[in-house]
Image: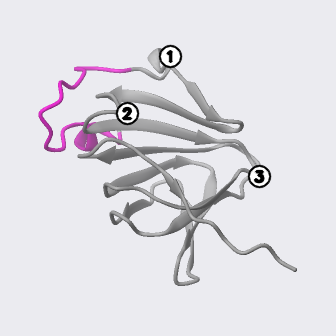
Amino acid sequence: MLFTGLLLLASNVAHPSNLTAGELDWQEIVPGAYFAAAYGDWNSQPHGKFVKFQPGMVVPLHTHTGAYDGVMISGKMVNVLDDGQRIDIEAGHYFHMAADRTHGHECISQEPCFFYTHSDKAWDLQLIETEAAE
């Protein structure tokens, strides 16, 4: 499987020896955004998780305390960065998001955006307030 190497990234968290797609326990985080743990508890420790955004999902600008690495499995999304860059992410692409980097996501495909992430820290999210248009 494409993600075997990511599951083995350095961490003191126990990793499963095998995990099939049918074993993923999807949790809706906000409407249209779902997480499924591969290993670890994303709320409290280093972890790997699968993420799925429904088509048209827009995740507003935000930051995370910890950095993460991701690999896109299917669909197409845009990572929107604080400096105005819009980076297309398609199946097979690797991406890295530095800790405290302001960014957002847009699922622009007709199919869900499905990707895997690894972080050596617990997951958190701080939304960035933007000025409302007048």
Predominant secondary structure, magenta span = loop
Viewer-nearest of discs 3 and 2: 2
- Binning the other alpha carbons within 10 Å of mark 1 as few (below 14), some (14 to 19) or many (20 upward) gives few
Q: Amino acid at mark 1?
A: Gly
Q: Which residue is mark 3?
A: 56
- Residue 28 position in % (x across, y down): 61, 29
Pick whichever of labels 3 and 1 is earlier in the sequence. 1
Pick whichever of labels 3 and 2 is earlier in the sequence. 2
Contact? badges 3 and 1 (CB < 8 Å): no
Res. 29 image quadrant: top right
Residue closest to the far top: 23
Res. 116 image quadrant: top left
| Whole-number angstrom distance, CA of label 3 to CA of label 2 | 26 Å
Q: Amino acid at mark 3?
A: Gly
- Residue 119 position in % (x across, y down): 29, 47
Q: Residue at x 87, y 80 (%)?
A: 134
Q: Which residue is mark 2?
A: 43
Question: Bounds of the magenta span?
Answer: 2-19
Q: Is 115 a magenta residue? A: no
Label 3 secondary element? loop
Q: Residue at x 36, y 28 (%)?
A: 38
Q: Which mark is residue 112?
A: none
- Binning the other alpha carbons within 10 Å of mark 2 as few (below 14), some (14 to 19) or many (20 upward) gives few
Q: Which residue is mark 1?
A: 22
Q: Is residue 77 above or below residue 110?
A: below
Q: How many marks?
A: 3
Q: Is 18 a magenta residue? A: yes
Q: Residue at x 33, y 63 (%)?
A: 99
Q: Is residue 101 left or right of residue 133?
A: left
Contact? badges 1 and 2 (CB < 8 Å): no
